[in-house]
Image (cartoon, helix red, strand yellow):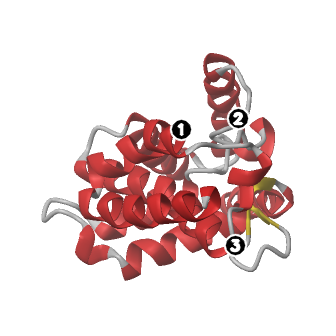
Amino acid sequence: MTARLDQQIAFLNEADKLKSILRGTTLCDASRAENSAEHSWHLTLYALVLADQAGPEVDINRVIKMLILHDLVEIDAGDNPIFGDYDAADMEAQEQIAADRIFGLLPADLRDELRGIWEEFEAAESPSARFAKSLDRFQPPMQNLASGGGSWTDYNVSEAQIEEKVGRKIAIGAPALWTYARARISAFFAGVGA
């Protein structure tokens, strides 16, 4: 019993490091960059509040599990902003190594369960994973809109780049959310160019 608890606490203590990983996206008030733990928490809230946007085959409880776990690998691999310059294959390899180490801190049954949930999110093949991925792509634009451009300004992002890198992924799992976001993004960029 003590050995199992030691492993569980070691994992939880390691997960605390996610609070130190800064992301490219700012808070809605633009006061500072958010950290990856805040992002994960905020996404779980998005899942609860926007559950009505999910298809009938989506398991919101599973989505919440995916979203709370999805960025743990950033403890080792760091955050790679979607509009940043990085090698996607190298990032994926680093994340797999990080997943081995971080989930490996857990007792075998929990390691396999939580790693499986993380892998499901990464593969984005199940309805729940597609919805979770859509929320992961939907939240940053909502924050960028609230903060007057946020990381879009920092990375000199165009509306077409948002459509390409974010829009398609949102539309796959939550088409109504992409319709909502696209209208607001278009209005934002129309206002910037005015």
Secondary structure of the residue carrying tag 3 is loop
Q: Which residue is mark 3?
A: 147
Secondary structure of the residue carrying tag 1 is helix
Q: Residue at x 53, y 38 (%)?
A: 161
Q: Which residue is mark 2?
A: 98
Distance of label 3 from label 1 (alpha carbons):
19 Å
The amino acid type of the residue labelled 1 equals Gln
The amino acid type of the residue labelled 2 equals Ala
Q: Which residue is mark 1?
A: 161
| Disc 3 crowd, CA 10 A, few/some/many (<14, 14-19, 20+) | some
Of circles 2 and 3, which is in front?
3
Whether residues under marks 2 and 3 lie with C-beta atoms below 8 angstroms apart, the answer is no
Of circles 1 and 2, which is in front?
1
Q: Residue at x 50, y 50 (%)?
A: 114
Q: Nearer the viewer, residue 7 or 19?
A: 19
Secondary structure of the residue carrying tag 2 is helix
Give the side of residue 168 with respect to residue 114, left or right: left
| Disc 1 crowd, CA 10 A, few/some/many (<14, 14-19, 20+) | few
